[in-house]
Amino acid sequence: MATAPQVPLTDARRERVREMIRDELETAWLYDQLARHSEASLADSLQGMAETERQHAAHWCSILGDDSLLGESISPSLRRRLLAWQARFGGLGLVISQLRQEELTDIYVYEADPDSGNLAEEEREHRAALAELDDHDELTSGHGVSVGAASTFRASLFGFNDGIVSNLALMAGVAGVAVGSDAVIVAGIGGWLAGAFSMAAGEYISVRSQTELHEHQIGMELEELLLDPREEQRELERIYRRKGLSKELAGEVAAELMADPQTALDTLAREELGLDPGGLGSPIRAAIGSFFAFSLGAMLPLLPFVIAYAAGWSHGWWALLASTLASAAALAIAGLLTSVITSRNPFYASARFVVVGIGFAAITFGIGSALPFEL
């Protein structure tokens, strides 16, 4: 049954409503995909959200007075396909924040649309449900990924990108001096190893130093908790009063938290120091991840030259071209994956990665060509 629209159905308005219908159906498709590859306890919630999204699409169809769009086959956008792919292979926890951001965008749109009814409120319920899924035990106990794992994924992705750009630029600079020289391969191998070990060492020192600092701060907090628990309880009361709780309620909350020393320490670390005691990070894992991420990226521009050398072919301009094309393809993929994290348009993100990476390689090639040296 058609619903009388409050906004006149001009051609532009009809097209806008059709866009919202497609968006709701694509989101329903995404939630169905996530449910298909999730544990049963999580799948039920996701399938419920998918059904609600289809109801939202039906609402907009009733505004148009045409429900034929509900029966059309859906071709999801590249961004939603990437979200489904990342959740399937990396775990639901990897995409929760992006899903909540999409729901927030829908809330903003529906709040401003007189024909939206109570859709904005239902999108708020979806955001709350996603937040509960993010806190679900199965997302942090082996069936998904924790926040730390998501951070590792981001660091690995950017390390991969750094490896491609830095080694391609280095090899292009040497190729500018003498494109057919073995020095291009030597530079590529040196750039790969030097960059990978440098990244690993830097990441280890950085994370180790940060972890030691945080452990020291938490240790001092534990000492204060053991030696002067009353003052720490008062500190908790002050924190919760600054958050807006009444004096009485803040006192009750602080007293209940102080009843368990471990809970009190965890709360003080989070509220007073801004630290998660269980998520301080592993310097060894960070170093290994950085090494392999950078290495994977750095080997891509090197590979055509190595293949040519091993086969006894001339590794001149064609090898440089193959190296550039392989690097551009890898940068495009890295851009696509990054767009899921940053919520950028996938094609824009890919183009930016490619233009920046190949642009720097072109600059170093030009500088190498201008140098008065011979190899």
Image (spheres, helix red, strand yellow):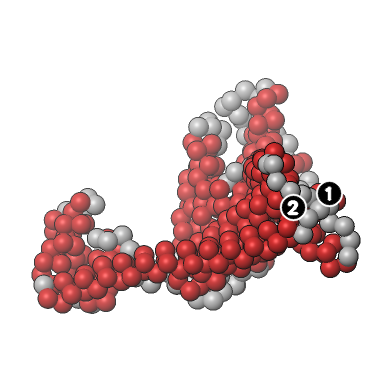
Q: Residue at x 46, y 55 (%)?
A: 128
Query: Could you tell me which secondary element the residue under label 2 belongs to?
Result: loop
Please give the label number shown on residue 334.
none
Looking at the picture, does residue 141 appear above or below residue 240? below
Camera-side residue of 139 and 221 = 221
Question: In which quadrant will I find the N terminus?
Answer: top right
Can residue 343 be seen here?
Answer: yes
The three-letter code of the residue at mark 1 reads Trp
For marks 2 and 1, give the CA distance.
16 Å
Rate crowding at label 2 as few (under 14), some (14 to 19) or many (20 or more) other CA atoms within 10 Å. few
Left or right: where 12 falls relative to 41: right
First in residue order: circle 2 vs circle 1: 1
Left or right: where 312 falls relative to 235: right
Looking at the picture, does residue 297 appear above or below residue 3? below
Looking at the picture, does residue 228 appear above or below residue 206? below
Image location (x, y in percent) of residue 195:
58, 61
Q: Residue at x 53, y 63 (%)?
A: 198
The three-letter code of the residue at mark 2 reads Leu
> Which is closer to the viewer, label 2 or label 1?
2
Camera-side residue of 53 and 194 = 194
Query: Could you tell me which secondary element the residue under label 1 belongs to?
Result: helix
Image location (x, y in percent) of residue 157:
60, 58
Residue beneath disc 1: 317
Q: Residue at x 16, y 71 (%)?
A: 224
Image location (x, y in percent) of residue 141:
50, 76
Camera-side residue of 158 and 192 = 192
Q: Residue at x 60, y 72 (%)?
A: 40
Residue beneath disc 2: 375
